[in-house]
Amino acid sequence: MIEDIDLLRTPDATRKLSQCIHCGMCLQACPTYSVFGTEMDSPRGRIALMRAAAEDRIGLEDFRDAFATHIGLCLACRSCETACPSGVQYGSLVELARVVIERNRTPGLAERLVRWLGTVVMMPHPGRLRVAARLLWAYEQVGLQRLVRRLNFLPKTVKAMEGILPPICLEFVDQERPAPALGERRGRVLFFAGCIQEALLSPVNQATIRVLQRNGYEVLTPRRQTCCGAAHLHLGDIELARRLARRNIDIFLQYAGECEAIICNAGGCGVALKEYPQLLADDPRYASRAGHFAAQVQDVSEFLAAHLNVPPRGEVKVRATYSDSCHLRHGQKVIGQPRQLLRSIPGLELVELQAPDRCCGSAGVYNIAHVDTAAEVLDAKLADIAATGAGLIVTSNTGCHMQLLAGARRAGLDARVMHVVEVLEMSYAADGK
């Protein structure tokens, strides 16, 4: 018997599964279908598997084998949701399926150890991540990284983890006091710093705060905030994701009524924060609070596009292309705002990708768990980028940023990778603001 299969039998799950009319509009939008060309590696094929499991047409062995394999290969990029004419909420379905999979398997000791270290010991604790960042900074600075990469002796999964490591900067967000508004004060916002973003890509957080300050906003980064829980949902650990959500809600709602918005600069984190109401829908204590919290969350591009009180004036003479974060585009539906901000920068030539809506292969921990498939998806993205001739690749999500840095290095592309806010800050700095 499949344990907890009832999660796919609830009225809500049944309704979502029955919405799929198997029209096939999702096929060409799906990165894994493009790689494998198999029905079971398409969104409608995976929905068919979920329905079969919910209707007891799949035995436990097949569930642990074929079902888990095909669901596990999904990037959860949600491009199928944008393509679907029936409005199937595929993202929530695949998250439920992953929860059921995890409750019916026993990972090996090594996997359990790595998961525990990453998702329990490290990610929920920003202080520990900062210590890890300092160690990684030393690893880069003393030349160990160059030696490790030259010798090329790491196992595939460890090599993938090491390969996406960006240059570490140890300038972290000050959570002791607010960053004051510059010029005319327009209001106050809260900043969600994230876990991996703050530890490994801290210049993005610094640029986010400075750009908000330049536009007249005092920025408060609440202490004791924690991971958004997105990685835990990707891995099927819904209970820990809920605990993290409750923690963030408690921390941020202390400032309810004092701030205009909760700003997030990572597409994947933002969609997780905005979907806390679904995650905590059955929690009588937190359901309504989750709704109040989520209503305040905005991506930094979303907020700045509506509150660009001081437009950038400094010239940034570069050809750039913008690579959408899947969760920002398909989950949050924030598409035009990053482009609007980039086009406001003098001298910047923005060139669109042929397939701006396609995944880069990062997808949370996908590029570590499914190294070869992620590499194929990334290769298609890099070919699209190379065709633009861009010298600057602009992104809006932590995982995408790291994946594209690694990919550009591997492909020998002569292009920098930067977040939207970093490019804005470059323009402000060029103008001496």
Image: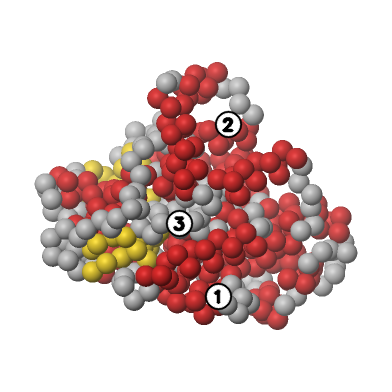
Image side of residue 109 versus residue 307, left or right: right
Label ID, residue 253: none
Coordinates of residue 271 in the picture (x, y in percent)? 48, 64
Coordinates of residue 136 in the picture (x, y in percent)? 47, 32
> Which circle's residue, 3 or 2, is located before the other in the chain?
2
Residue found at x 73% / y 51%: 69
Residue occupied by mark 2: 159
How many numbered circles are shown?
A: 3
**CB under 8 Å between discs 3 and 2:** no
Please tell me whether mark 2 sits on a helix, a strand or a loop.
helix
Gap in angstroms between the C-alphas marked 3 and 2: 32 Å
Q: Amino acid at mark 3?
A: Arg
Q: Quadrant of residue 17?
A: bottom right
Residue occupied by mark 3: 224
189, above or below 209, in the image: below
Residue found at x 88% / y 64%: 1
Coordinates of residue 70 in the picture (x, y in percent)? 71, 54
Q: Quadrant of residue 412?
A: top left
Label ID, residue 286: 1
Please tell me whether mark 3 sits on a helix, a strand or a loop.
loop
